[in-house]
Amino acid sequence: MSHTTIPAIGLGTFRLQGQIVIDSVRNGLAAGYRHIDTAQIYGNEAEVGQAMAESGVPRGEIFVTTKVWIDSLEAGKLIPSLKESLRKLRLQQLDLALIHWPSPGDAVPVAEYMGALAEAKEQGLARQIGVSNFTVAHLRQAVDAVGAAQIATQQIEIHPFLQNRKVVEYARSQGIHLTAYMPLAYGKVMQEPLIVDIARRHNATPAQVALAWSLQQGFAVIPSSTSPANLKSNLAARGLVLTAEDMAAIATLDRNERIANPDGIAPQWD
């Protein structure tokens, strides 16, 4: 597997702790996932590392992403925080290191933490670097700081009810790849009649339809699941091809319904 391409479907581990995350990662790797997404703030890097180490899947086959938390964005803290993440994950190198959120109130300038992140890559702590939850304004500053070619992805909430078109458009204009998190809107897609209807016509699940909708736009997706059956089923979304009519119908579901919007952390969204 080329380590420069982010696998189209990854396994998200947000909100999964202890034995639950160990089982999810172990079952995910057994089902065929080869991209595991975690973050410093999830408090599960050590468990993710344990599950990967015990999986028997060679390190070279797994693409691992973690994200730097807002309290480690200063130049002197970012690299030590990534070294700590590597220790917990039992890895020599990350495949992808992201800034989890822009600094709240821009207390730390974008140029400072992007510079430190680029330095982490130079030192070999991560093969690739990128950003998460950046607005267009933050993305512009990140591009100014390190160049668009350095930004391997922008990971942001995208699902049928929050299509984030301004950010998507700007990222595409810069050639920046997108990773959709919460691609199933925490299960809400399963209740959406239009998606249920499309799923029935394709003999697929509503979750597969929502994932295929993202994949067909060129986004990577990182759904999370603790059920072995759903883990397998989500992975099978790669084989589902939606029609232009399906895509157009799902486009009408956009209602700016944002799930991840933490007080005191979230930026002024576009």
Image: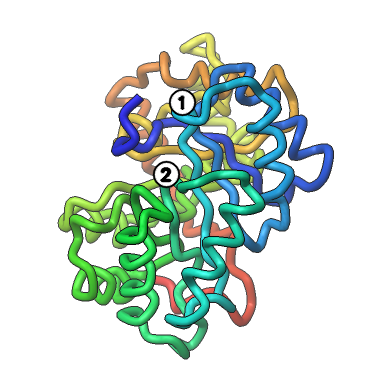
Dot 2: what SS? Answer: strand
- Kind of residue indicated by mark 2: Asp
In the rendered image, the vertical position of residue 172 relative to residue 204, given as above or below: below
In the rendered image, the vertical position of residue 91 relative to residue 170, given as above or below: above
Q: Is residue 245 visible?
A: yes
Q: Is residue 104 left or right of residue 114?
A: right
Q: Is residue 252 left or right of residue 185?
A: left
* Quadrant holding the N terminus: top left
Please tell me which residue is depicted at 37% across the width and 37% down the height of the picture: 6
Which label belongs to residue 95?
2
Location of residue 148 (image quadrant)? bottom left
* Quadrant holding the C terminus: bottom left
Q: Residues within 10 Å of mark 2 (few under 14, many from 20)?
A: many
Q: Earlier in the sequence, mark 2 or mark 1?
A: 1
What x and y, as percent, mark residue 20?
80, 38
What x and y, as percent, mark residue 142?
28, 71
Please tell me which residue is depicted at 75% across the width and 35% down the height of the picture: 22
In the rendered image, the vertical position of residue 37 relative to residue 75, given as above or below: above
Distance between the alpha carbons at the discs numbered 2 and 1: 11 Å
Pick the residue in front: 100 or 80.
80
For mark 1, what is the residue? 61
Please tell me which residue is depicted at 68% across the width and 57% down the height of the picture: 42
Q: Residue furthest right?
A: 19
Please tell me which residue is depicted at 23% across the width and 75% down the height of the picture: 145
Location of residue 204 (image quadrant)? top right
